[in-house]
Image (spheres, rainbow, N blue to C red):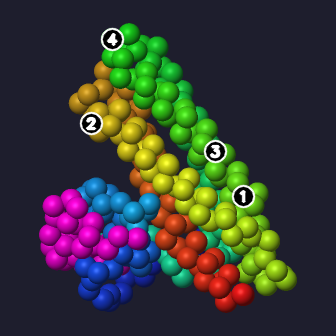
Amino acid sequence: MCKLARVPSAEQTPTATAATLGGIVAERPAAAAVLEGLGLDYCCGGGKTLAEACRERGLDPETIARVLDSIGVDGGGRAAHDVSRASIGELCEHIVEEHHRPLPARLERISELLDKVVRAHGADDPAVVPLQRRYEQARSELLDHMRVEERELFPACRELERGDGAPGLDRRLLPHLEDDHGATGAALAELRELGGDYRPERAHCNTHRVLLHELAELELELHRHIHEENNVLFPKVRERLASAA
């Protein structure tokens, strides 16, 4: 199993408001939780600068930069994977082991919870029916997406890193996968809206409350997953392709 280096506690440079959200989280993984809480999209929207993203949300960039500086590199002692220093091959293995492999079981668990909630409360709360429908669509698309990555992208990335002749990576694949990531981000936003912002006080029963918690955790996991691909792996691959050319 791939275990990336842990981020050590160390001095850091102050966060620049001109830094991109994706770059901030790549350098300082603990910043992800802060950005999540503020509703700042560091995965699909990771190319925006902190200043741009804050202005869109009506936040003061300088204040948020100071908040990010206050958490430290490791979030106050919480270990985090330092994906920014990993090689392409290490990143591929890390993504498979830490994100892809556990995901099908988590998705199946949420499907089972949705089935129970719809059976118990679908007649009284019609909102849970479109929630289930949209979730199952997103689940199918996500599983297809991961299969493409494991069958096409990651083998080609490892070949590229080894330098085994001309890389077998279709140059159209990365933009296609980024489009998929954008669609996943949109689906997550729709699910949150359909799920009443996952507020536990809206739950009809304990099963519904667990479902809302699991959907919120899935959203967080997928944001981190997409961030590591869009803002760390894909730029490394493009850089290697450019140098190979």
Quarter the C terminus occupies: bottom right
Q: Which residue is mark 3?
A: 143
Callout 3: 10 Å neighbours few (<14), some, many (20+)? some
Q: Secondary structure at mark 4?
A: loop
> Main SS type for the magenta part?
helix
Q: Depth check: give the residue in front, 80 or 156.
A: 156
- Along the polypeptide, which appears first: circle 2 or circle 3? 3
Q: Which residue is mark 4?
A: 124
Amino acid, disc 1: Glu
Q: Quadrant of residue 8?
A: bottom left
In the image, residue 40 above or below residue 7: above
Residue shown at 66%/45% (left/top)?
Answer: 144
- Along the polypeptide, which appears first: circle 2 or circle 1? 1
In the image, residue 119 above or below residue 79: above
Q: Is residue 70 magenta?
A: yes
Q: Secondary structure at mark 1?
A: helix
Marks 2 and 3, how far apart at CA = 27 Å
Callout 1: 10 Å neighbours few (<14), some, many (20+)? some
Amino acid, disc 4: Asp
Marks 2 and 4, how far apart at CA = 18 Å
Q: Is residue 224 left or right of residue 37?
A: right
Residue 58 location, x and y as percent? 16, 61
Q: Are marks 2 and 3 in contact (CB under 8 Å)?
A: no
Marks 4 and 3, how far apart at CA = 31 Å
Residue farthest right in this picture: 165
Q: Which residue is mark 1?
A: 150
Amino acid, disc 2: Arg
Q: Is residue 142 left or right of residue 218?
A: right
Residue 151 location, x and y as percent? 76, 57
- Along the polypeptide, which appears first: circle 3 or circle 1? 3
Q: Secondary structure at mark 2?
A: loop
